[in-house]
Image: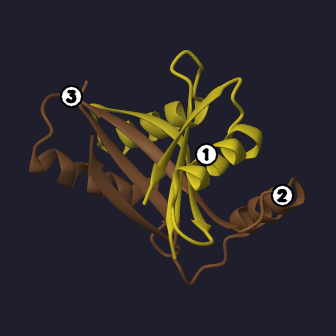
Chain colours: A brown, B yellow
Amino acid sequence: MPRVVVNVMPKPEILDPQGKAVTGALKRIGFDGMTVRQGKRFEVEVDGEITPEVLERVSQAAEKLLANTVIEAYEVVAG
Amino acid sequence: MPRVVVNVMPKPEILDPQGKAVTGALKRIGFDGMTVRQGKRFEVEVDGEITPEVLERVSQAAEKLLANTVIEAYEVVAG
């Protein structure tokens, strides 16, 4: 089935407490030199072909529901 | 700074209650014909170049901490 991916990440200027916690936890178990930011990945299966209209519709879904655009940025990727 | 992305998704055979909730919510606000699975995206900034060794190290971090490999699958992607 055709798939569109929506990546949602905290905006660069926004604190990311989850990412900070993960970065600290990695350090504690020996993984130094890694800084992590944590976001969400949505895999959206759509009916029919992936057209520019479908991508636009998924973008609207991201804008309205998948991302909180005050604090998060999203990108829509075919495949 | 060089970046490695780790995508973590619920395994296909695992129920995904978050994804189901999102799918239902999209339907209610008028976005029909989309089925969503929800996972996590980690953007990992690493010191130095992205070498096969660095990717292997990030894979180990994913295996140990970022993913729960009983119920989640992960992929490690440069960039």
In 3D space, how far apart are the residues under numbered discs 3 and 1 (Cα atoms)? 37 Å
Image position, residue B17 (x, y; %): 60, 30
Asked whether the residues under marks 3 and 1 belong to the same chain, the reply is no
In this image, A33 relative to B2: left or right?
right
- Same chain for marks 2 and 1? no
Between label 3 and label 2, give the one nearer the viewer.
2
Protein chain holding label 1: B
- Foreground residue, B47 or B42? B47
According to the picture, the residue beneath numbered tag 3 turns out to be: A47
x and y percent of residue B65 in the render? 76, 45
- Camera-side residue of B29 and A59: A59
Quadrant hosting residue A32: bottom right
Q: Chain of mark 2?
A: A
In terms of secondary structure, where does tag 2 sit?
A: helix
Identified at 52% across, 57% down, the residue is: B51
The residue tagged 1 is B56
Alpha carbon distance from label 3 to label 2: 40 Å
Residue B5 x/y as whole percent = 51, 54
**Is B37 left, or right, of B46 in this rendering?**
left
Residue, far right: A28
Say which of marks 3 and 1 sits in front.
1
Amino acid type of the residue that numbered disc 1 sits on in the rendered structure: Glu
Mark drawn on residue A25? 2
**Classed neighbour count for the residue bearing mark 1: other residues with Cα under 10 Å, few (<14), some (14–19), many (≥20):** few
- Of residue A2 and residue B16, the one placed in the foreground of this image is A2
Distance Cα–Cα, label 2 vs label 1 = 18 Å
In primary-sequence order, the first of circles 3 and 2 is 2
* Residue type at tag 2: Ala
> Can you name the residue that lies furthest to the bottom here?
A13
Residue B48 lies in quadrant: bottom right
**Residue at image x 56%, y 84%?**
A13
